[in-house]
């Protein structure tokens, strides 16, 4: 792919709710891509995130008041913009602007009225996080405009990149107030597509029959869908992360993405060689220790450790199918090993279980009888256990984690940031200890969880409804089963039961493999992940930057189009 030098950015702004704010997969996208962008555009790439930190500072932000003090003073006194500058504590350490947005709530209705008049954004039925996100986005737009004008960047190629509906208002603000800046808008998952799937409606079989506006009204998603659709339609370049989501965008947002920008991964921090062996040993010890103290009895050292993880989206992430697969697995007579299955999905919790903490510290003996009678399968205390779908499904299927059961489930409903009170290790530090990961996704625009697993040499299962699964199927998953490190299972609106059966068979098959076979599997997994790192995938973003600049040049050469829009 040839990139015209006249269509490469001199300065890049990238705004997201998840800059220095670890909420979900978009944090991983941006924080791992930052390293290669910083290498290409050294300190000319500026990430913009919300300043939502009070007494406790973001652990991913290192403030540096020596960066642009004159501009910050100008923005504060003239625009009432409170901006903190610093570095993102990730590889590459790019410059970050954290923006306060509370002061804009008092003019919220005026902002919404102007978006309606300018672009037809319908904010009338807005509620909850829409207001917070949109006020941040408005502040982010002002931040970009003020930096651009203060530093006289009119003669430079400048791109402003916005992620998800949460920054849609910023994309529209820049389009109107600073038309010379080329805008790029990325939807990682359409808000209405996710809602359709999450409400148990058939997304894929009926996709061509859905009207995005009508479905948004039906599902009370009008405001989010409206701002996302308008941002997508008015951006100079519109992108999404996979072919799966591109079809969704074309139908529901009524714009075909200009470029598909798949999510890469930054592999420099992954331990290698002897360091990896030590990391795996440490992780496996931690996983087994917590499992033993949770279930109340010893677990065999050669137990198969498997897991699923991600956001708590019971159907979309395939958590229901994973539990059903484990239920089928425990009925398989050919299963020779003990299987410990972890569900690492953050839920609504009070905190770590005090009794489990005491056992882990050696202060309280694990009593098998008591443990079995309580069906111990959770590491943290839930706020509302009777309405928790995972707990209810595990209980209904009769999992009690007794010593006689070959398959045991451990539900970890906490963020694994290293301070959860039970493991006290980050997710990546535990990932290396797994023998297999399983992600039977129904709605998964990309799928960082299987991608991360492969990068840590963990054989994984995903589906054809995950963007990463589609990519892997095309690039590497040529052999039947998991013999090449990954298995991409065909999934549609109707075949959840068949998917569960296939997963159970694959886990059972893994339990029968020799150490040498498993070693080959792990090598194959890592080799596939190497094909999907940012070194290979950044070219898609460079193509998107080029298209954004080209389309902005065309737009500026026909100024009447601005009024028509």
Image (spheres, rainbow, N blue to C red):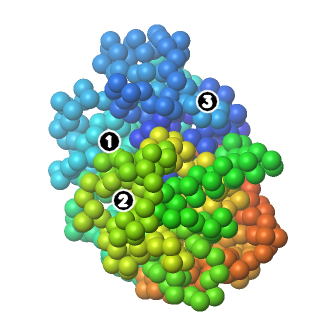
- Give whichever of 55, 254 is nearer the camera: 55
Q: In this view, does 24 lie above or below 144?
A: below
Residue position marked by numbered label 1 in the rendering: 133
- Give whichever of 163, 440 is nearer the camera: 440
Identify the element where label 1 is drawn.
Answer: helix
Q: How crowded is mark 1: few (under 14 residues within 10 Å), some or many (20 or more)?
A: many
Q: Which residue is drawn at 39% across and 12% down?
A: 74
Residue position marked by numbered label 3 in the rendering: 93
Residue position marked by numbered label 2 in the rendering: 191
Q: Residue at x 64, y 76 (%)?
A: 337
Horizontal and vertical percent for residue 19?
47, 37
Q: Do tag 2 and tag 3 residues touch (Cβ < 8 Å)?
A: no
Horizontal and vertical percent for residue 485?
71, 69
Circle 2 or circle 3, nearest the eye: 3
Image mark for residue 173: none
Circle 3 or circle 1, nearest the eye: 3
Q: Is residue 480 visible?
A: yes
Q: In this view, does 90 lie to the left or right of 374?
A: right
- Give whichever of 458, 380 is nearer the camera: 380
Of callouts 2 and 1, which one flags the residue occurring earlier in the amino acid sequence? 1
């Amino acid at each position: 792919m040839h990139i015209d030098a006249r269509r490469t950015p001199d300065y890049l702004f990238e705004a997201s709710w998840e800059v220095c704010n670890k909420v979900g997969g978009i944090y991983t996208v941006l924080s791992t891509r930052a390293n290669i962008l910083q290498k290409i555009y050294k300190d000319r790439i500026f990430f913009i995130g919300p300043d939502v930190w009070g007494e406790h500072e973001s652990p991913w932000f290192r403030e540096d008041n020596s960066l642009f003090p004159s501009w910050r003073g100008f923005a504060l006194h003239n625009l009432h913009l409170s901006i903190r500058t610093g570095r993102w504590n990730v590889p590459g350490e790019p410059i970050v602007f954290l923006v306060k947005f509370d002061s804009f709530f008092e003019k919220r209705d005026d902002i919404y009225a102007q978006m309606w008049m300018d672009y037809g954004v319908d904010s009338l039925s807005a509620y909850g996080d829409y207001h917070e996100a949109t006020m941040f986005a408005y502040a982010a737009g002002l931040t970009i405009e003020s930096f651009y004008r203060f530093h006289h960047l009119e003669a430079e190629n400048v791109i402003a990149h916005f992620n998800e509906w949460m920054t849609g208002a910023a994309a529209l603000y820049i389009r109107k107030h600073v038309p010379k800046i080329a805008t790029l808008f990325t939807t990682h998952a359409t808000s209405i597509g996710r809602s359709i799937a999450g409400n148990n409606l058939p997304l894929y079989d009926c996709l061509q029959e859905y009207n995005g506006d009508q479905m948004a009204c039906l599902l009370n998603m009008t405001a989010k869908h409206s701002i996302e659709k308008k941002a997508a339609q008015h951006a100079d370049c519109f992108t999404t992360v996979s072919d799966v989501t591109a079809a969704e965008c074309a139908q529901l947002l009524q714009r075909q993405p200009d470029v598909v920008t798949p999510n890469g991964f930054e592999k420099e921090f992954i331990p290698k060689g002897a360091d990896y062996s030590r990391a795996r040993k440490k992780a496996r010890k931690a996983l087994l220790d917590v499992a033993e103290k949770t279930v109340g009895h010893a677990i065999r050292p050669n137990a198969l450790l498997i897991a699923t993880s991600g956001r708590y989206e019971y159907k979309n992430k395939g958590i229901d199918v994973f539990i059903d697969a484990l239920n089928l697995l425990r009925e398989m007579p050919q299963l020779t090993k003990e299987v410990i299955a972890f569900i690492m999905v953050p839920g609504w919790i009070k905190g770590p279980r005090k009794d489990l903490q005491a056992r882990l510290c050696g202060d309280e003996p694990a009593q098998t009888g008591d443990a079995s009678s309580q069906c111990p399968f959770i590491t943290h205390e839930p706020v509302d256990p009777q309405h928790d779908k995972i707990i209810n499904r595990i209980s209904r299927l009769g999992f009690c984690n007794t010593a006689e059961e070959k398959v045991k489930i451990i539900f970890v409903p906490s963020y694994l940031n290293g301070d959860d009170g039970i493991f006290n290790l980050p997710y990546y530090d535990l990932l290396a200890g797994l023998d297999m990961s399983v992600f039977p996704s129904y709605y998964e625009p990309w799928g960082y969880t299987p991608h991360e697993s492969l990068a840590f040499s963990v054989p994984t299962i995903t589906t054809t409804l995950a963007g990463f699964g589609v990519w892997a199927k095309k690039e590497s998953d040529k052999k039947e089963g998991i013999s090449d490190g990954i298995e991409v299972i065909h999934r549609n609106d109707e075949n959840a039961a068949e998917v569960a059966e296939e997963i159970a068979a694959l886990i059972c098959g893994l339990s029968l493999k020799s150490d040498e076979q498993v070693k080959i599997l792990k090598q194959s997994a890592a080799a596939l992940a190497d094909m999907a790192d940012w070194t290979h995938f950044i070219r898609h973003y460079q193509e998107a930057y080029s298209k954004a600049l080209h389309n902005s040049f065309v737009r500026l050469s026909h100024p009447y189009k601005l009024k028509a829009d």
